[in-house]
């Protein structure tokens, strides 16, 4: 008489090795864009099993994706830093004559737009929690400030001092 605790021979293999193999396949199929229902059908397991597996796999995916996203962000941030230095040098080289006010304004707006671009890069990679609306509000305030500075008689000098302090 067979032992009641013994599982039938038709059951899927059990143990960490089988579990790990199934989760690797679930991870691969998930990465390829298959739905949980499609994966369950392919692996001949229940939808609940696939959902549990995805729940266990997802934190590992996040860690891997975060590490990659951070690498991308660091590279992008370094590029933005270089752009900021170059734009600051360009602004410093523009003559203080009134006929160059438009060029100076453009350089100031470029400099003021770099933090917003950096924030958008972080957001696109899922690393920055600041809402896009706040970034747009800040960018609008920065543009208004730059416009106001350019209308002031001493605006160029004040803007240059602000930018010099920001790029140190």
Image (cartoon, grey):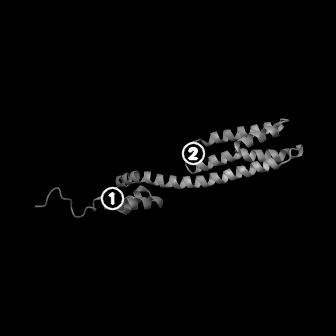
Label 2 – label 1 distance at C-alpha: 35 Å
Which x, y percent locates residue 147? 79, 39
- Name the residue nearer the viewer: 94 or 5: 94
Q: Quadrant location of the C terminus?
A: top right
Residue for point 81% across, 37% down: 155
Which x, y percent locates residue 106? 79, 47
Q: Is mark 1 on a helix, strand or loop?
A: helix
> Which residue has dot 2 on it?
128
| Total number of numbered discs in the rendering | 2
> Which residue has dot 1 on it?
19
Residue that extends furthest to the left in the rendered view of this protein: 1
- Name the residue nearer the viewer: 68 or 12: 68
- Label 2, residues with CA under 10 Å away: few <14, some 14-19, many ≥20: some
Q: In this view, does 123 lie to the left or right of 90?
A: left
Q: Is mark 2 on a helix, strand or loop?
A: loop
Residue for point 21% across, 59% down: 7
Which x, y percent locates residue 13? 27, 62
- Label 1, residues with CA under 10 Å away: few <14, some 14-19, many ≥20: few
Q: Is residue 35 left or right of residue 95?
A: left
């Amino acid at each position: 008489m067979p032992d009641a605790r013994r599982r039938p021979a038709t059951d899927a293999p059990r143990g960490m090795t089988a579990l790990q193999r199934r989760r690797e396949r679930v991870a691969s199929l998930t990465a390829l864009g298959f739905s949980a229902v499609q994966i369950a059908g392919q692996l001949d397991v229940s939808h609940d099993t696939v959902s549990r597996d995805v729940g266990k796999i997802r934190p590992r995916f996040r860690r891997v994706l975060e590490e990659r996203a951070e690498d991308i962000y660091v590279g992008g941030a370094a590029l933005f830093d270089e752009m900021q230095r170059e734009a600051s040098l360009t602004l410093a080289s523009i003559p203080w004559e009134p006929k160059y006010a438009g060029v100076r304004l453009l350089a100031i707006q470029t400099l003021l737009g770099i933090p917003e671009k950096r924030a958008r890069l972080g957001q696109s990679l899922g690393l920055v929690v600041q809402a896009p609306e706040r970034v747009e509000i800040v960018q609008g305030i920065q543009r208004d400030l730059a416009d106001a500075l350019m209308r002031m008689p001493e605006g160029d000098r004040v803007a240059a001092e602000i930018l010099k302090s920001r790029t140190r």
